[in-house]
Image: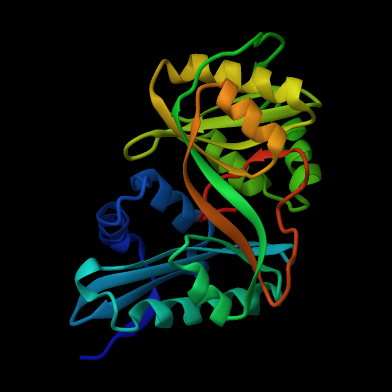
Amino acid sequence: MGFDVRTLRRLDLPDALRLSTQAGWNQDAADWVRIFELAPAGCLAGWLDGRLVATATVVSFGTTAQWNGMVLVDESLRGRGFGSTMFSSILSLARSFGGDAVGLDATHLGRPVYLKQGFADVAPIDRWSGTLRAAGPADGLHLVDRSTFDDVAALDRAACGADRSGFLLHLMNEPGVVGVTLPGSGFGFLRPGRTRAHVGPLVASDDAVCSRLLSRLAKLAEGSEVLLDALQTSSTSALLKRHGLEVARQLTRMTFASPQRLLMGDPVRAVVSFEWG
């Protein structure tokens, strides 16, 4: 039986989680449920001999951006071209959704593959890790809930140039997820992960607002270690160091055909995660 690419089904989610866990990634079951519920047509699975052995996803933000992620192959089957097949399939699907406005965050190993597929470097992106600590005041903040959601959605839309309100609403209502906001100036989310909590998205109008949000999220994290993915800038890096984090790995933000600043407005201090942009 040959390698077959199909649309992922809900009943396949435990097998998809097995692949991301095998790779050492931080996604938990809720991460897979979120991406499936919000982008079911963009979730692909690769099958071999009746087993799910590969995945790839694309999240569509209208015609503004398509974001590729979760390209995974069972470790016992790597080097046989299945990953390239999955990526070619997901890239074709992404382009059918919104043309060439396609982005991804690439590891050092993945970057040469994506360059061959026609992607161009846009910017470095760092994954930060450590125990988030408060480093100043955290006053004037509110929880993200129904009363503050419209303001948060508007801030996010202005920051990244895409309507991600559906994603934010889903995130706000998930168990264990908490969001904080300084109305009119910024917001940030803290959500569970498989091994560590994850901070993101984080949007702030300036460094002072960013620090207040991080200080409040530090209190909510209660000393647990977190991950945070940030586009590399000197001011953001200085802030994250001051709040107790260190760079754990480096990646490259890439876009198809030519460099495009997808989901990259200046107020974006932490992206959602590699599969969401």
The correct choice, above or below, for 19 with respect to 28 in the image is below
Residue positioned 75% across, 20% down in the render: 208
Figure quadrant of the N terminus? bottom left
Q: How many marks?
A: 0
Q: How is the image coloured?
A: rainbow
Q: Along the line of sight, which residue is nearer the eye, 194 or 237?
A: 237
Left or right placement of residue 73 versus residue 232 in this view: left
The correct choice, above or below, for 266 with respect to 57 in the image is above
Q: Along the line of sight, which residue is nearer the eye, 91 or 248?
A: 248
Residue positioned 45% across, 20% down in the render: 221
Q: In the current view of this chain or complex, which residue is farthest to the bottom? A: 1
Residue positioned 48% across, 81% down in the render: 89
Quadrant in which residue 149 is drawn: top right
Left or right placement of residue 121 versus residue 251 in this view: right
Left or right placement of residue 106 versus residue 148 in this view: left
The correct choice, above or below, for 140 with respect to 249 in the image is above
The location of residue 189, given as percent across then percent down, is 57, 31
Quadrant in which residue 10 is drawn: bottom left
Q: Along the line of sight, which residue is nearer the eye, 245 or 208?
A: 245
The location of residue 121, given as percent across then percent down, is 65, 66
